[in-house]
Image: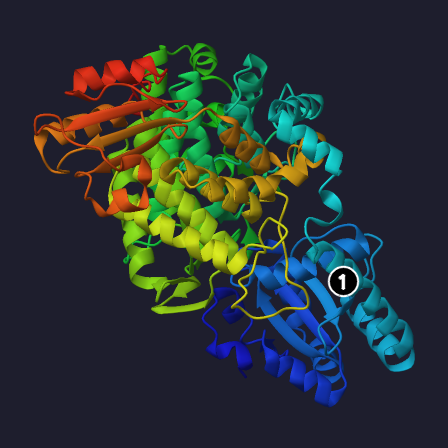
Amino acid sequence: MPNRLADATSPYLLQHSENPVDWLPWGEEAFERARRSDRPVLLSIGYAACHWCHVMAHESFEDERVAAFMNERFVCVKVDREERPDVDAVYMNAVQAMTGGGGWPLTVVVTPEGAPFFGGTYFGSEPRWGQPSFRQVLEGISGAWRERRGEVEEAARTVHEHLRVLEAPYGPTAGSATGAERAAADPEEAAGHALSALAATFDAERGGFGGAPKFPPHGALRFLLGRPEAHALAMATTTLDAMADGGIHDQLGGGFARYSVDARWDVPHFEKMLYDNAQLLQLYAEGYRRSGLSRYVAVAEGIVGWLGRELRTSEGGLCSSLDADSEGEEGRFYTWTEPEVEAACGADAALALRAFGVRTPGPFEGRNVLRVAEPLPAVAAALELEPGEAGARLERARRALAAARERRPRPALDDKVLASWNGLALVGLADAARLLGSERALGMAREVVRFVRAHLWRDGRLLHVWRGGNARVEGLLEDYAYLGLGLLALHRVTLEAPLLELALDLAAVLRRDFEAEDGGFFSTSCRGERLLVRPRSLADAAVPSDNAAAAELLARLARLTGDGALAQAAERAVAPLADAMARHPQAFASALTVRRILAEPPREVVLVGDPGSDDTVALTAAWRRRADPAVAALLVSGPDDALARRCPLAQGRERLEGRATAYVCRAGACRLPVVGAAAFERELDAIGLAPLPAAPRAG
């Protein structure tokens, strides 16, 4: 019989709607029931693509006896951590404080007032790995609640006080005031220390940092790609190469899995998330700009293709994820045996088996994850083939394998659309358009913006999640910050004023509803639901710190508007983290990037002309060949343009002799205005803005 999750919109909650557990969704009703019945609340937090969430559901939540005990002794609440990342953040911090670790599924038991006193992650149906069974855990908690209430309430008070410390401005992770002052005077010092710290943990053979498991180090790679040092670029390209060659990269369909369980990137945890692929798209595009390695174009275009084919809704938004499981097995859709490859590839089977490292038995429960096992020239030589013939045959084998895979039952799609993750995707798509010349990415980016305007932007405020025509949950800091940065990235390509105007509107709400009096930003709006504490996110995780993303948005808008208050707010958000940046660069890489942006000498470009005229189009095309995030660029029709009223940089700019005109400035000094694309490009040369490398088309 369906429980109270049957009316939910979240795919994760709907997965549990037939459980015999009397699940309630997050909300006041659950806590009121707990108060009336004097029972603790059992929070189970996960997400639709989570493999171990499925395992725990099958083992425990579908077990009639376990469910009966849960229903008798607890008020049981299911939370989709993607739909409510604010709730997840509060209770993940609590579990990390209690146990030193965290992850999903997240299991937390709280008082009827919401204060946590027990936490963990996955608990099996039988005792294993030194842990009790889930039933044993439940019995112990229930006994303590009934017989040792004072101890339970004292534990809850202790954890609550710990969370309140984290709610205070910056908490214990910020570092000393001395460190903040030093970095404010010389932000390169923190960057230098961070680079050394990354080098100390870098895996020179296999890329990435540290050992297994390995997650794509998004923030660290972005930091490294923004540095001038040769060894910074070498660490970035080694990691990008290793991930592209590994099983974490879908060699047939494009896109990347969430992480690798081994140190070689070969055996992934198979769920594929929008947020990972959005960030990796930006990184491979930027990696091509910095290195000129054409293989990165193919990887990036593979991600664009996967996003459009697998995640795009008919309305133009991008869905959240693909499940790890199909046919009841983790990775079944993506893995292969030798006979399966031979049946699919025919005469090309020997080449495919060697190139993709397929053997019997395979390393993943007897099956194989496809990877680049050897360079193609080595495979060709071993099979006595000409390199050109080997390449053509391998591509034919790849298409045959992809076609065979399409006949398999597919992993489930979590089709909710999140404003924040679509903002991350907007950054990646816009950069693919800017750096790789991808018109497909540009079209998808425009679709994302149209979707957000139509479905998630209501009465001057964002909503966090949309599914099936229903938008809900008050927008979070990550929604405003990531989406604002995505709009700026697309504006950098097109110079279309409505994109910048919406980014400015988002920033105004962000400061009004999220900024803390002492600097930095809360993760939740002052208008939203009040949780046990008001969370803050200072460190990067799988997604950038929302505090750092908000600071970056304001820093970039400060350059475009000349509004010093925006730059000051950005500085207040990251300056106290100086010591943490230097000691823990992987966790604070986004804050390091903000410090670099704030320290860069200003460079500005203002184009004045009718957006559709030939001479204006020529100037914007010249800009697009060199477009760089370090340069603030605007297009206005003239001094009376509405955008000029919001961006003083554009005020007073006139056309010369009625022709589209370019104004170029550097470090507070403006050069003489010019007309014509050739003259404009000479001015860009003068401020050190080189043309972007031409992107080869991936074959």
In the image, residue 230 sits, relative to residue 464, either above or below, namely above
Q: Position of residue 516 (x, y in %)?
A: 60, 55
Q: Look at 88% across and 75% down and name the residue there.
A: 144
In the image, 624 versus 415, the foreground residue is 624
Q: Quadrant of residue 605?
A: top left
Q: Quadrant of the C terminus?
A: top left
Q: Quadrant of residue 164?
A: bottom right
Which residue sits furthest front? 652
Residue 322 is at least partly visible in this image: no
In the image, 552 versus 644, the foreground residue is 644
In the image, 206 versus 210, the foreground residue is 210
Q: Position of residue 645 (x, y in %)?
A: 28, 46
Q: Which residue is mark 1?
A: 119
Query: Which element is circle 1 on?
Result: strand
Q: Quadrant of the N terminus?
A: bottom right
Tell me: 115 left or right of 47: right
Dot 1 amino acid type: Gly
